[in-house]
Image (cartoon, coloured by chain):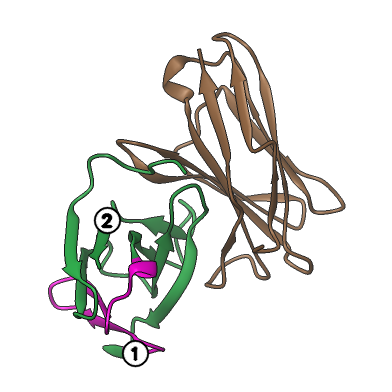
Chain colours: A green, B brown
């Protein structure tokens, strides 16, 4: 596989622990937020999304929290597994923008130790 | 398999040359997006097409162009290539012109030598 980023913040966790990945977004008017997982050599894969009128959404083993006051988004992964090792990107969508809808953050590399 | 097909997977070419990257969207999706991913820039939005028409433009260089054909597949043309154009190029598709539900392909790795 190929590395998608050598200068990313890295989070290292023990298998079975919970992981929290944070993201600061840029546009206070963004309507929609998405977390993507990117494994080496693959394209981004949708994990979970949340609309701007919500502050929490849960999926299978994942929870996304949105704090619009400080423009902060977080992804919580419960009982982290080796297969969760990847780069995680947050992305925001502003429906009224002419710049294009889906804007990505820088990414965080999650490394799970067995 | 995400349903979004990109070809070729790898491309090596010399500076000054021109290449074409191809994307077939997921069946039923009308919108195609192109992104560039380099080591120090993350995923940068380039351009979006919806049902054959350009919908939005991002940080796309004038040396780059794209189009979406009647069968909804899209091509990204990169010309007068420079070393700095080396990157992963991803295509994504969605049903609507805006909103969530983006599905990404596996990308084309372009290396300019």
Whether residue B109 is visible here, answered yes or no, is yes
Q: Position of residue B48 (x, y in %)?
A: 60, 50
Whether residue A93 is visible here, answered yes or no, is no
Mark count = 2
Chain of the residue under the numbered disc 2 shown in the image = A
* Foreground disc of the pair 1, 2: 2
Q: Are marks 1 and 2 on the same chain?
A: yes
**Distance from label 1 to label 2 (Cα)?**
22 Å
Q: Position of residue A94 (x, y in %)?
A: 41, 66
Left or right for B108, reference B4:
left
Chain of the residue under the numbered disc 1 shown in the image = A
A62 drawn magenta: yes
**Residue B33 or A88: which is nearer the viewer?**
A88
Q: Position of residue A11 (x, y in %)?
A: 18, 61
Q: Which disc number belongs to residue B36?
A: none
Q: Is residue B14 above or below residue B75?
A: above
In the picture of the structure, the residue carrying the numbered disc 2 is: A109
Q: Secondary structure at mark 2?
A: strand
At 64% from the left edge and 38% from the top edge, which residue is drawn? B9
Residue farthest along the front direction in this orientation: A114
**Magenta region, residue range:** A57-84
B67 drawn magenta: no
Residue farthest along the left direction in this orientation: A70
Q: Is residue B18 above or below residue A92?
A: above
Q: Is residue A98 above or below residue A80?
A: above
Q: Are marks 1 and 2 in contact (CB under 8 Å)?
A: no
């Amino acid at each position: 596989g190929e590395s998608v980023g050598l200068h990313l913040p890295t989070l290292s966790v023990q298998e079975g622990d919970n992981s929290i990945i944070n993201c600061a977004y840029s546009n206070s008017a963004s309507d929609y937020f998405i977390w993507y997982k990117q494994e080496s050599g693959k394209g981004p894969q949708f994990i979970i999304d949340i609309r701007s009128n919500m502050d929490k959404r849960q999926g299978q083993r994942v929870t996304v929290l949105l704090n619009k006051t400080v423009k902060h988004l977080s992804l919580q992964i419960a009982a982290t597994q080796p297969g969760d090792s990847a780069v995680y990107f947050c992305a925001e969508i502003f429906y009224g923008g002419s710049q294009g809808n889906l804007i990505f953050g820088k990414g965080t590399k999650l490394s799970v130790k067995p | 398999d995400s349903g979004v097909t990109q070809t070729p997977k790898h491309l090596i070419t010399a500076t000054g040359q021109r290449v074409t990257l191809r994307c077939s969207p997921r069946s039923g999706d009308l919108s195609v997006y192109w992104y560039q991913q380099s080591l120090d820039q993350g995923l940068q939005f380039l351009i979006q097409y919806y049902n054959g028409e350009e919908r939005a433009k991002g940080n796309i260089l004038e040396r780059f162009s794209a189009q979406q054909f009647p069968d909804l597949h899209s091509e990204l043309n990169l010309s007068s290539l420079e070393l700095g154009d080396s990157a992963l190029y991803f295509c994504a598709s969605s049903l609507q012109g805006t909103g969530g539900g983006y599905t990404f392909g596996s990308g084309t790795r372009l290396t300019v030598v």
